Amino acid sequence: MVAETLKASGYQNAYLESEIEEDEVFWETNQNRPFILIDALNFGAAPGRITLMPLAQALWSSSLSHRLLPSFLSLLSPGHVKKSYLLGIQPQSLTSKDISEPVLEAIAKISDVLK
């Protein structure tokens, strides 16, 4: 939802995972750029809490509920992992498909900062 919000406001460098997963040109032209992956992340905080952590920490932490898709991870070079981050938003519920008000507020804050 963050990527969609950024795209709607004209931000050029926001991508959905599905857009870049098989885009060889994207990966060739962005080999040395850091990424900020934004997703729901259950780390036991209050709903809507925003946390930024090194991607490597998120990948190797056994205490986080979040796991990235193996197909996506296979596209990331060790260099990407080393200099990229996971920006996590604590969801209100892990089972509901509805996005809670605190999460919507967090998405709005992130979108405002990244514009």
Image (cartoon, helix red, strand yellow):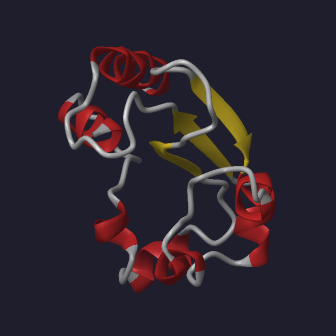
Query: Residue sitting at 70 percent across and 78 percent down?
Result: 77
- Give 12 or 66, whichever is nearer the viewer: 66
Is 51 in front, or is 14?
A: 51
Left or right: 107 as drawn, with respect to 96 = right
The residue lying toward the viewer, choosing from 87 and 77, is 87
Above or below, 85 relative to 29 = above
Q: Could you tell whether 34 is left or right of 78 in the image?
A: left
Q: On the rendered image, what quadrant is the C terminus found in?
A: top left
Query: Which residue occupies 63% across, 75% down?
Result: 76
Identified at 37% across, 25% down, the residue is 107
Q: Position of residue 23 (x, y in %)?
A: 36, 80
In this rendering, the answer to whether 78 lies above or below 32 is: below
| Image label count | 0
Q: Is residue 37 left or right of residue 26?
A: right
Q: Quadrant of the N terminus?
A: top left
Against 12, is 114 above or below? above
Image position, residue 36 (x, y; %):
58, 47
Task: Please say if 31 is above or below 25.
Answer: above
Classify residue 9 by image quadrant: top left
Say which of 30 and 20 sits in front.
20
Spot occupied by residue 67 in the image (x, y as percentages of width and height): 56, 63
Q: Position of residue 109 (x, y in %)?
A: 43, 15
Residue lying at 42% horizontally and 80% vertically, measured from the top left: 25
